[in-house]
Image (spheres, coloured by chain):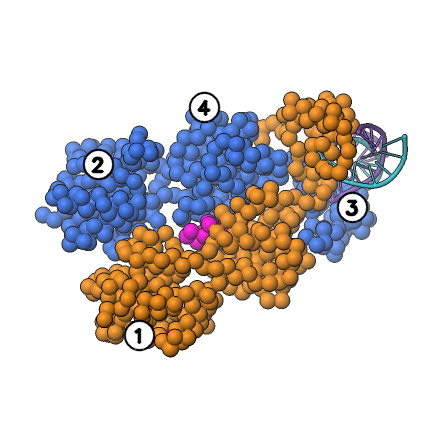
Chain colours: A blue, B orange, C purple, D cyan
Amino acid sequence: MTSGRRVTMADVARSAGVSPTTASFVLSGREGVRISEASRARVRAAAEALGYRPNATARSLRTKTTKTIGVVSDGITTTPFAGDVVRGALEAAAERDHLLIITETDGAGPAETAVVNALLDRQTDAVILATMYTRYVVPPKELHGRRVVLLNCLAPGFDAPSVVPDEIEAGRTAGRVLLAAGHRSGIWAIGGHQAVPATPEGIFAGNERMRGLQEALRAERAMLDGVVECEWNAEDGYREVRALLTAGVPLRALVCSTDRVSFGAYQALAEAGRSVPEDVSIVSFDDQDIASWLRPALTTLALPHHEMGRRAVELVFDAEAQVSAVHRVTMPLRERGSVAPPRP
Amino acid sequence: MTSGRRVTMADVARSAGVSPTTASFVLSGREGVRISEASRARVRAAAEALGYRPNATARSLRTKTTKTIGVVSDGITTTPFAGDVVRGALEAAAERDHLLIITETDGAGPAETAVVNALLDRQTDAVILATMYTRYVVPPKELHGRRVVLLNCLAPGFDAPSVVPDEIEAGRTAGRVLLAAGHRSGIWAIGGHQAVPATPEGIFAGNERMRGLQEALRAERAMLDGVVECEWNAEDGYREVRALLTAGVPLRALVCSTDRVSFGAYQALAEAGRSVPEDVSIVSFDDQDIASWLRPALTTLALPHHEMGRRAVELVFDAEAQVSAVHRVTMPLRERGSVAPPRP
DNA sequence: TTGAAAGCGCTAACAA
DNA sequence: TTGTTAGCGCTTTCAA
């Protein structure tokens, strides 16, 4: 800044012929203090005339509150379409007259501690810890006793509320969509738990989605013909579906772990001359942009990024929510054109 | 925060048996002040022992600098993959020990003024004004005389540097890629200037890309068979290319305005039994995720989001750059599989 | 080489 | 209803 802020509250007070106290009261709009209407008007006029703007730094030093929330993410801003998280958070923060300081770390460890300290040094009123994909984390100890909200992650034993997508219910919905269309057999899950070498136990989203899916199917005495574990990308989706096709397994419906996997599946099916949804129905997860570009457009369960961002900052202000509860946000079903009854 | 920061510098000084002045000098690591090694050690030990952390708010009040940069965007965080801009900016800011306060407005006007004021009240050292797509803006008057950098936008007459993608050169490169493969005719531009009803004059990116493209072609005595003006999405790409195919125009190469348009073009070509790149070559712009998922993968000119974010904050620190210069960032060519020589 | 003291701009007891 | 005064935690003359 070339010219620092000029006019201070003292200037306004002087110009209005009142004390700083009076000026402070009217300028910060405090209730319950009785100031004559005349003084109020004079202060306001003076402030207006001088172009007064409060110095938030000075105010914060005194009040120990900055109306600022720190966000520490492990790359959420990078994930395609997850800028939605930020937008939701921004929105909710703006409604409460707060600002967001966004930071990013490559993961946990010393870098994360440094970032958290930078935030804490600036006296942020709270910090939101966000992860790119749903997983367990252990918050840095600097955060103990601070107001914290976990966004897209869980930290058992740490005293802070979490916001995660309701993956189990989404899995159930995926199953129900297929059942409702009349599917009972020839159903395969592509991507599965993502039980691949890097994540042998599967990942949170995978495990929950599969659990919900199996549950819904079983409730109607139906079941999966198989679960193909692979990376959740277009490449693997293409390869695995083609393999299934080549092997000649009966295929009537696919539950793909992500829209990227679905994209690969579309390519493999098209190549094999099978049409979606007449020959093969597809239900997917995430609702990335591509889901609506595909033809037919993809029926998918949307990751509620925007809503999650919003909820996270709402929880910052929710005094009751201090207890470490897990808030599961519904993943809305986007019904489009990739599901139809199986061929008779 | 449940427990405010405890230990102050006064505590450290007292514990170390020195004055606050001494403590301040060693803790803030100021050069050119001669403090005995003994005092230094004692202060550092005390700080460590007490778990001292500086209060940035107090420091800022005194020094009038916050090591914080405000970012005002009109939705850049929302655009797919443009979270990259934020990541680049975050990176460059972190290198200089600065933090970013990110905000968003629906556009210009009073909302923007409010946001800018909120930032200025908090004494941010600079403000980066960012737009979702490249365009002209008029910065709010509150920003006059402040340190400002324009990211992805231009404000003629406003004294601040701009960072924009080098669209003209990208257009030239697109042309050269085709020429190098041997294309001379049957070349169509899909999307063009985006001279559609909503933007009858075309948009910045469209105009510059077309200009560069035509220039490169003309330099080799080649030319476009036609420019199809349409919205830059998959839907329109599909429709317009299909129309071209239906009309039976000779088609050997396509320059698509965005990867989304290319996506639609792929669909239309596949439907018509034309293969990419054997029958028709495609060069595209943007390099969204989808570009690498397509088969064949798409040859495209990448929007240098990450680099742009980085440059913007670098300019904040570049004293020389105060003059209102326009910094054009190269759009790298991603050569993949969608261009081949025309069939003989 | 170190310390005393003033003060950044604001809020909040406490008095008047 | 309003003013005096004392800080918030830090930096920075200036003097010792």
Chain ID at mark 4: A
Q: Which residues are magenta?
A: B77-86
- Circle 2 residues within 10 Å: few <14, some 14–19, many ≥20: some
Taking the magenta stretch, the answer to whether it contains residue B84 is: yes
Label annotation for residue A157: 4
**Which residue appears at 45% of the width and 59% of the height?**
B331
Number of the front mark, 3 or 4: 4
Q: Is residue B161 above or below residue B8?
A: below
- Residue occupied by mark 1: B185
Taking the magenta stretch, the answer to whether it contains residue B63 is: no
- Callout 1 secondary element: loop
Q: Earlier in the sequence, mark 3 or mark 2?
A: 3
Residue A16 seen in render: yes
The alpha-carbon separation of the residues under discs 3 and 4 comes to 49 Å
- Residue occupied by mark 3: A10
Residue B196 seen in render: no
- What is the x, y in percent for residue B262? 32, 61
**Which residue appears at 17% of the width and 43% of the height?**
A244
- Callout 4 secondary element: loop
**Which residue appears at 81% of the width and 48% of the height?**
A14
The alpha-carbon separation of the residues under discs 1 and 3 comes to 73 Å
Same chain check for tags 3 and 4: yes
Same chain check for tags 3 and 2: yes
- What is the x, y in percent for residue B26? 71, 32
The alpha-carbon separation of the residues under discs 2 and 1 comes to 49 Å
Residue type pointed to by label 4: Gly
Same chain check for tags 4 and 2: yes
The answer to which of A106 and A71 lies nearer the viewer is A106
Label annotation for residue A227: 2
